[in-house]
């Protein structure tokens, strides 16, 4: 009799240990499926902006997972929802009522009410407990983007700058999303030759789109006809101590082009970093897109300068950006010079974080390259 009672007790503890562990394993599998589904939903939404297509993708990805040996079925009517995740909220939560969509919540269930039913237990049925329930949910969210375009406006860019302008406008349009810009997205621009200036201060796309778009469409060029100073006389040298879009014309000779001198990407990276730190928010993904077609070059004036110092400064400024969680995407435009191959390698060395390395010999490719960059927003599993 005592032996029989002991065996029942032992079996009971065994059933408890085995099936609790089994349910924990099933819960982990459910969580993995939910995480994968939420991540997939927002990766798809990032490129399509379509909830239906994103739901289909999430359903397929969730279905690649198994719980307790059975393929997972996602209830697309009840268990996936799109909404907002406000990173600026001190205690952010998934909120389907926010006026923007940057998040998806996916729930994976194995319960009496779910399509796949509950998890069948292993030993507990001996004692009349046949099944157990597991539920897991996950939220995937797109982080807001803060981007500073850092454009080389030196004379060698003159013939390709119309394409660079179009690429910048398309980049802005992609962030604006037809009037549905995410409220935390910001954009700005730094222009540089021997030194850099903020051409467009970092600002919110949803409120400043019209102003920025008009300015870039009207004024964005390798030169700016409203920017002095001009050389004192025709034929004089033009030194860009504080460059913006330099003036294309000379007051004494409209046919003469000034020669904005020097190429200093390190100064551009430093200024872009300052913009992102000073005007950005800690929760956003910060990016610099550096466009150039050559090595560094000292300005043609009397200021102390060596190409070696400019090169070192560019690397140091890129490291500073990276240390502040700023990614740098590089875009090299091959101008066909004998030094282009080496310059391309050097420019690529300035990429940081999850920034991409890009190059082309055809400036008409710039729009597609920047379009790829703007769509590369990492998805965060936030819950």
Image: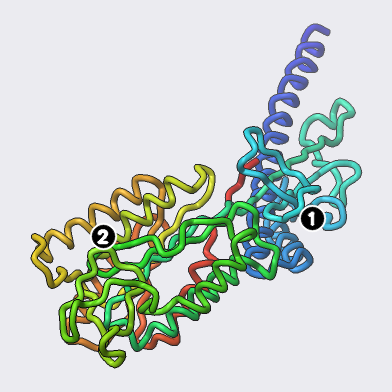
Q: Is 32 on the left-hand or right-hand side of 220?
A: right
Q: Which residue is mark 2?
A: 266
Q: Residue 145 lies in what quarter of the image? A: bottom right
Q: How many marks?
A: 2
User: At 24% from the left edge and 72% from the top edge, which residue is drawn?
Assistant: 345
Picture quarter with the N terminus: top right
Label 2 SS: helix
Disc assigned to residue 110: none
Front disc: 2 or 1: 2
| Residue 38 sits above or below residue 297 on the image | above
Q: Nearer the viewer, residue 77 or 183?
A: 183
Disc assigned to residue 74: 1
User: At 73% from the left edge and 41% from the top edge, which residue is drawn?
Assistant: 136
Q: Is 268 on the left-hand or right-hand side of 127?
A: left
| Residue 228 sits above or below residue 187 on the image | below
Q: Nearer the viewer, residue 52 or 295?
A: 295
């Amino acid at each position: 009799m005592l032996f029989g009672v002991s065996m029942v007790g032992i079996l009971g503890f065994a059933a408890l240990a085995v099936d609790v562990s089994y349910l924990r394993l099933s819960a982990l599998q459910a969580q993995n499926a939910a995480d994968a589904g939420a991540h997939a939903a927002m990766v798809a939404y990032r490129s399509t902006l379509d909830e239906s297509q994103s739901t289909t993708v999430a359903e397929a990805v969730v279905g690649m997972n198994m719980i307790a040996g059975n393929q997972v079925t996602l209830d697309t009517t009840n268990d996936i929802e799109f909404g907002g995740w406000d990173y600026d909220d001190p205690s952010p939560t998934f909120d389907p009522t926010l006026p923007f969509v940057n998040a998806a919540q996916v729930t994976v269930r194995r319960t009496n009410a779910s399509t796949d039913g509950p998890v069948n237990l292993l030993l507990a049925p001996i004692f009349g407990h046949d099944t157990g329930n597991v539920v897991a949910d996950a939220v995937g969210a797109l982080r807001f983007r803060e981007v500073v375009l850092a454009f080389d406006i030196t004379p060698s860019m003159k013939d390709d700058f119309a394409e660079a302008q179009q690429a910048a406008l398309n980049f802005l349009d992609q962030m604006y999303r037809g009037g549905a810009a995410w409220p935390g997205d910001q954009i700005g621009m730094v222009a540089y030759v021997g030194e850099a200036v903020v051409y467009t201060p970092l600002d919110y796309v949803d409120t400043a789109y019209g102003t920025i778009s008009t300015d870039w469409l009207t004024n964005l060029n390798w030169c700016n006809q409203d920017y002095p100073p001009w050389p004192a006389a025709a034929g004089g040298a033009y030194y860009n101590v504080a460059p913006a879009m330099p003036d294309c014309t000379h007051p004494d000779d409209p046919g003469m082009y000034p020669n904005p001198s020097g190429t200093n990407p390190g100064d551009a990276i430093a200024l872009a970093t300052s913009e992102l730190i000073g005007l950005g928010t800690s929760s956003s993904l910060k990016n610099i897109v550096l466009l150039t077609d050559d090595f560094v070059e000292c300005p043609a004036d009397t200021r102390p300068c060596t190409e070696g110092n400019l090169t070192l400064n560019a690397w140091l400024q890129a490291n500073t950006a990276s240390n502040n969680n700023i990614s740098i995407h590089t875009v090299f435009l091959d101008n066909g010079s004998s030094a282009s191959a080496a310059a391309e390698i050097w420019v690529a060395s300035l990429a940081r974080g999850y920034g991409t390395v890009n190059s082309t010999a055809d400036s008409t490719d710039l729009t597609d390259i920047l379009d790829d960059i703007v769509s590369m927003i990492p998805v965060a599993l936030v819950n």
